[in-house]
Amino acid sequence: MISLNRATKSFGQGDARITAVDHVDLSVERGQIFGVIGHSGAGKSTLIRLLNGLERADSGEISVAGLDLSHASEAALRKARLKIGMIFQHFNLLWSRTVAQNIAFALEIAGVDRATTKARVTELVGLVGLEGREDAYPSQLSGGQKQRVGIARALANHPDVLLCDEATSALDPETTDAILDLLSDINRRLGLTIVLITHEMHVVRRICDQVAVMEAGKVVETGPAKAVFAQPQAEVTKRFVRQITSADTVDGAFDPALAGGVEGTLIKLIYVGPLARQPVLADAIRQFDLPINIVHGRVSRTRDAAIGELYVEVPAEGAALDALLAYLAERDIVSEIVRGGAQS
Ligand SMILES: Nc1ncnc2c1ncn2[C@@H]1O[C@H](COP(=O)(O)OP(=O)(O)OP(=O)(O)O)[C@@H](O)[C@H]1O
């Protein structure tokens, strides 16, 4: 549905030149919710502006819903934009128009006749849960309701893709979750492809299937959200994941360095999905006759998976430890020795 091949965009000249998007390769499948996460200045906004044709790449190819944006004429881009819906952090509503008129505006621009517009607006108001608020003005709405109007407007012309630019950053946590759940529901019901940019790992965890992590214009890591959560590779990704896992833990993040009284080898185990419901550890204890002691554990959820993280103490090293780690690896459990435990 969307592909970027070595897409690059710079601003400024000479020493002041900044490469906001630097040779980015990405591929988004139809029906996916794809998150792009990064800190401020990482290049996310520029990337999303490349995807809706508001910026042209200096080099590389960008294709959205079958249109090659890198080489399209201005007229083709304008037409394509009708099929690329977008929602914004600050909603960008017309303040002098009611909810229904804001939604209808997108259809007026597309030249849709009055009767069709009226019926479509009613349908969209229902889809985003704003029944009864059709005649309200934006100033009379809560932040979450304003974003619902933004979503309805973005969906008016049956877009192929919905781009979300920090769509929940101005909302409180509860409203954020309600809007994310609405996006997830729309994605499932309409099979709509969604690309969202965010600086919050919570957003990625709650609804994204795939994620790309950006830093200084480059994509430093990409993959299924559950894999990136389970085993973040880049430093910046590890910090994002830590941010969320420590927020989830009532008594703060577990710090293995502070775990007292651990005599044997301290190992961190990570397992994803159905494994969380299998007694792999109990089996390992029986198989190796080792009193494996659980020091700390937690389970976090992504859109479609549970990720378990366990810190265990094992009175073994050398060949016995190797055999245990091999046994766990065969069962798709990732292990990392945190302290002690010479392997043979
Ligand atoms: N029109 C522009 N002219 C000059 N520099 C720009 C322009 N747009 C973006 N930049 C620069 O490109 C880099 C990436 O900016 P971008 O806004 O894409 O990042 P971001 O990840 O979206 O950050 P934020 O969340 O703060 O918007 C920044 O250094 C920014 O200053």
Image: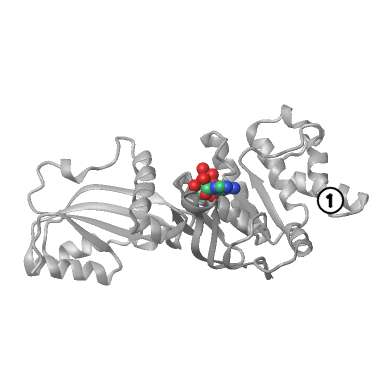
Asked if residue 232 lies left or right of residue 303, the reply is left
Q: Which residue is mark 1?
A: 109
What residue do we see at 70% from left, 30% from top? Answer: 141
Quarter of the image where one finds residue 232: bottom left
Residue type highlighted by circle 1 = Ile
> Between 282 and 42, which is closer to the camera in this rendering?
42
Q: Position of residue 314 (x, y in %)?
A: 12, 56
In the picture, which quadrant includes the C terminus? bottom left
Q: Locate the N terminus by quadrant.
A: bottom right
Q: Secondary structure at mark 1?
A: helix
Residue drawn at x 25%, y 42% as measured from the top left: 254
Q: Position of residue 170 (x, y in %)?
A: 57, 35
Which image quadrant is residue 131 in?
Answer: top right
- Looking at the image, residue 182 sits to the left or right of residue 116; the answer is left
Answer yes or no: is residue 333 visible: yes
Query: From this viewpoint, which residue is outermost toward the front?
Result: 14
Packing grade of label 1 (10 A; few <14, some 14-19, many >=20) is: few
- Residue 122 visible to an observer of this rendering: no
Does 326 appear above or below 150? below
Please state the horizontal and vertical placement of residue 324, each as a whole percent of the image.
16, 67
73 or 125: which is nearer to us? 73
